[in-house]
Image: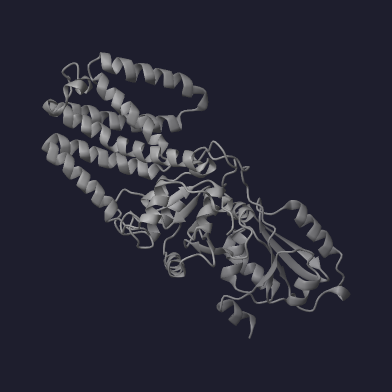
Amino acid sequence: MNNENLQEQGLISGNLKKDMTYLNAKLDVDHNFDVVHRIVYIGGREACMYFIDGFCKDEQMQKLLEYFMTITPDKMAGDVHEMSKKDIPYIEVDMENNWKNILHFLLSGVFILFIDGYKKALLLDTRTYPARSVSEPEKDKVLRGSKDGFVETIVFNTAMIRRRIRSASLRMEMMNAGESSQTDIVLCYMEDRVDHAFLAEIKQKIEGIHVDSLTMNQESLAECLYQKKWYNPFPKFKYTERPDTAAAQVLEGNIVILVDNSPSAMITPTTIFDVVEEADDYYFPPITGTYLRITRFLIALLTFLLTPTFLLFVNHPQWVPESFSFILLKEAPNVPLLWQFLILELAIDGLRLAAVNTPNMLSTPLSVMAALVLGEFSVNSGWFSAEVMLYMAFVAIANYTQANYELGYALKFLRILNLILTQLLGLWGYIGSLVVSFLFMALNKTVSGQSYLSPLIPFKWTKFKNRLVRRRLPGALKKS
């Protein structure tokens, strides 16, 4: 087969000048300053190396070049297979003749070496990605336990899981998605514990993703994997920045999905009980872990019910026992209570967004200013009642007991719906909003298709008890 036919079929020709002409035009090396190519002689043969500046380890590149320069024509290998075994003093070496694959590896940071007369290119994985150091994540902090967290480099993240699971059954399967981005995706699972039917379904969905790029990393992937019932606010995936949490989920038979450039892991399948669990539940003794878990459940329930229940009682003060009459308003409000609650719901999100974008050096003085102006002065001015400010302050702070942002916003949206229905329809609106909220959870499905309220629906007492009560860890139990 001649060189022209090979080029037409997407294969390298073995003629260095023609291959360089094709690759230089494809990559537009005259304008892309970071695409570096250099012609050298190896064993009397003309060769050309290609790599992306900033992705290769300079020390290793220098040592490889020094070795290549020592190869004389009489010691030069006869073909690429022999050379890869005899003349490449490096561990991660592969061969490829397909242009599509060569371009993918080159743009991923792999060092590519073309040698005149060889119809396969040599791929040397000398990659090193810019990465920050491993540190404790800001969101998933624990009082005890390890202080390392995922980073944006996917290889580092898989290594942190491997460090915790030294089993031959652990699988790290690489895939990619996005026509332009070619984003790396790793599926982590235990071969002997995972649901293989669900695993095959996840693989099929990822392979069927036809988008230009995963612009928002995990969120883009999540929306591609779960496209039905987008209007349901409850989270379909659990996200964690902690390797120990991800490793524990893998050992339980779940699938952990890592996406390159994202410092967190996606855990699936996920129920509502998975979402509210945290690492601190397991880093303390069973009785303390159970207390923390139940406390988190109760606080989540309070954040949803507190303000609508207060609104219901204020609108119907005759239902309030005399001993609890102190919860009612002391003064008639200037602004209707419903509007006070809705304005504060919006204002709290505004303050949260402002805190995210506030420079650290200004955060303290601006926090003091916000507390004075939006707290005391807003009550004294008559815009808000003191009781409304108190309950909304509790809701705002209590939301942070949940590590999952999506769950916090799901409760927020349903709380707003509850407020509006309670104001319009009274007790029936209050009851109706509870029914609607329960239906949102009951009719929701995980990515695997199981009930979002499992093991409550369908009810399985043993599993449900284990969700509420923290048992002793398997490693602490004696073998029978």
Which residue sits at x=70%, y=58%?
Answer: 126
Which residue sits at x=36%, y=50%?
Answer: 272
Residue 179 x, y percent position in the rendering: 47, 63
Q: Residue furthest front?
A: 480
The front one of 465 and 150 is 465
Q: Quadrant of the C terminus?
A: bottom right
Residue 130 x, y percent position in the rendering: 63, 47
Q: Residue furthest top?
A: 380
Q: Quadrant of the N terminus?
A: bottom right
User: Is residue 467 shown above or below 186?
Assistant: above
The answer to whether residue 426 of the structure is visible from this angle is yes
Relative to residue 235, is residue 281 drawn left or right? right
Residue 88 x, y percent position in the rendering: 78, 67
Q: Residue furthest bottom?
A: 1
User: Is residue 291 shown above or below 165?
Assistant: above
| Among the 4 quarters of the image, the one containing residue 26 | bottom right
Relative to residue 338, is residue 373 drawn left or right? right
Which residue sits at x=26%, y=36%?
Answer: 305
Residue 448 x, y percent position in the rendering: 38, 62
The answer to whether residue 236 of the structure is visible from this angle is no
- Give the number of marks: 0
Applied colour scheme:
one colour
Relative to residue 123, is residue 46 drawn left or right? right
User: Is residue 207 shown above or below 402?
Assistant: below
The front one of 114 and 17 is 114
The front one of 25 and 245 is 245
Which residue sits at x=17%, y=42%?
Answer: 431
Relative to residue 46, is residue 219 drawn left or right? left
User: Is residue 376 shown above or below 245?
Assistant: above
